[in-house]
Structures are given as C-alpha cells and as structure tokens.
Image: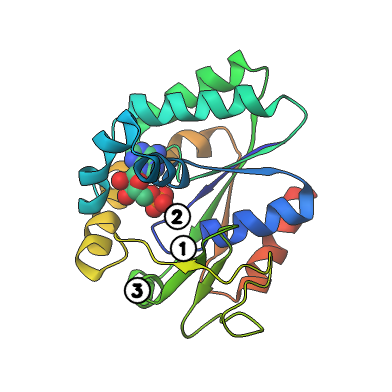
C-alpha cells in the first residue's frame, strides 16, 4: 500500500508518518528529511538546496523526484511508502504517477490533514526532533516522558530546523496554498482523498488514519 500525507507545514505529517511506520510496517519517504540530510552531508544536491530551503521556497521538481525514485528502488516492492512532503506541485504529482508505475506500484490513499494556519505557527516554532531517529517533540504539546531522552530510541540529542521561524513558516504556507493545494482535485477525481481534522490530538489523528488504512 502506498499513501500520500498532505497538509501545510506543521500539520503533523512527519509525526503521523512515524506512527504509521510503527503501526503498519510502512516506510516514511520525506523529501524534506532527504534534502536536510543532503545539506548536512554537503552533497551537490544539498549545496544547491540549502538557500532555497532557508527561504521556504521549493527546490526543483527534478531533484526531489530523483530522490524519491532512488529511495523506491532501494526499498523494494514489499514495503509500503508513506509520501511525506512529496508531491508538492502538479508537475511532481504527474512525475510520481510515472515513477510508481515504473516500480509496479500504485497510490491507495491521499490523506489530507486539515488545519488552522494561525495555530500552525505556534506548533512549528515550538517543535524539535530527536537527532537520531527523527521522532517529533514540542515545547508545549509533547515533551519526552523522561526529560532530555527520546521516547522512541533513547538518544539525548535533539535538534531544531533552521526554517522553523515565523517568517519562513508564513512563506512555506503561502507556497503550500499556491503550489501544493492544486494537486488535490486530480486525486479527488480518482476517489482516493480522505480528509482528517489535523487539529485533533495526535492520538485521534493516528486513529483516524488507521481507520482509513484498514478500509
Ligand atoms: P519539509 O520538511 O517537507 O517541510 O520540507 C522542508 C523544505 O524542503 C521545503 O520548505 C522545501 O524547501 C524543501 N522541499 C521538501 N520537499 C520538497 C518537494 N517535494 N519539492 C520541493 N521542495 C521540497
């Protein structure tokens, strides 16, 4: 089974992707995570992407589609994919169809997390992740059970994203509205879109996703 998690920055896509991985044995494919890894490693892709990401703009369709294609090749057909942060433009959505059919796969669900944008700024500016496994935390909403220790993997290293500041977040939301939201009607026409209240608790959102995946 392959699914797309869709929603503006801070909607909870990454948090939910990790939970779906744990519940369903699927694999999160986050182009944002892949690009951040490339920036950290100083690869040619990372060097090209860094300034674009710092502004909250989109890197080229070609770069992200190649990253996804390579991950699917490495992953093999037996593991389901959770696309997180990809596709983000109509061109990427079209390319993804081609990549999936090349790999003998197809999209089963597009799950849109619906959210209130003003609340997202608070969510995003307070969030941080485990430096080891990527588990998401929040200063107000979700601290680790034991202070300073990741619940999921026990690491004591945490990090924040450089693009999680208010100005960049507002730009990223505008980009979501103008570039990414227009991909929804195409998926709606195929009858594979489900909408979830992304402002509900993490548990409730996971439960709603589990229900969709077990249909
Ligand atoms: P994310 O972690 O999904 O919020 O992505 C962080 C940043 O990486 C975005 O603001 C973009 O600059 C870049 N990025 C991630 N995924 C894509 C994509 N599918 N297309 C273009 N740029 C992307």
Q: Is residue 132 above or below residue 118?
A: above
- Residue at 35% of width from left, 36% of height from top? 89
Mark linked to residue 149? none
Label 3 packing within 10 angstroms: few (<14), some (14-19), many (20+): some
Q: CA distance from mark 3 to mark 1?
A: 13 Å
Report whether residue 88 is seen.
no
The quadrant of the picture showing ligand 1 is top left
Camera-side residue: 135 or 9? 135
Report whether residue 76 is seen.
yes
Which residue bears the numbered disc 2? 7
Q: Secondary structure at mark 1?
A: loop
Label 1 packing within 10 angstroms: few (<14), some (14-19), many (20+): many
Q: Earlier in the sequence, mark 3 or mark 2?
A: 2
Residue 167 in percent (x, y) is at 19, 66
Which residue bears the numbered disc 3? 125
The quadrant of the picture occupied by the N terminus is top right
Q: Secondary structure at mark 3?
A: helix
Q: Is residue 139 above or below residue 30?
A: below
- Residue at 72% of width from left, 65% of height from top? 207
Label 3 CB sits under 8 Å from any ligand 1 atom: no
Which residue bears the numbered disc 1? 11
Q: CA distance from mark 3 to mark 2?
A: 17 Å
Q: Is residue 129 above or below residue 74?
A: below
């Amino acid at each position: 089974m392959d699914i797309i998690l869709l929603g503006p920055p801070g909607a909870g896509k990454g948090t939910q992707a990790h939970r779906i991985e744990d519940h369903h044995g699927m694999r999160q494919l986050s182009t944002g995570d892949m690009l951040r890894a490339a920036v950290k490693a100083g690869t040619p892709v990372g060097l090209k992407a860094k300034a674009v990401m710092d502004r909250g703009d989109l890197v080229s369709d070609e770069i992200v589609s190649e990253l996804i294609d390579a991950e699917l090749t490495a992953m093999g057909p037996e593991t389901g994919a959770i696309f997180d942060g990809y596709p983000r433009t109509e061109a990427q959505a079209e390319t993804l169809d081609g990549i999936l059919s090349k790999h003998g796969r197809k999209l089963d669900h597009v799950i849109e997390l619906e959210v209130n944008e003003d609340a997202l700024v608070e969510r995003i500016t307070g969030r941080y992740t485990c430096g080891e496994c990527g588990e998401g935390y929040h200063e107000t909403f979700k601290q680790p059970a034991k202070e300073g220790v990741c619940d999921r993997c026990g690491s004591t290293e945490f990090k924040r994203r450089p693009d999680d500041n208010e100005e960049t977040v507002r730009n990223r939301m505008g980009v979501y509205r103008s570039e990414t939201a227009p991909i929804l009607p195409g998926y709606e026409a195929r009858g594979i879109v489900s909408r979830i209240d992304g402002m509900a608790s993490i548990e409730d959102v996971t439960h709603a996703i589990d229900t969709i995946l077990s249909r």
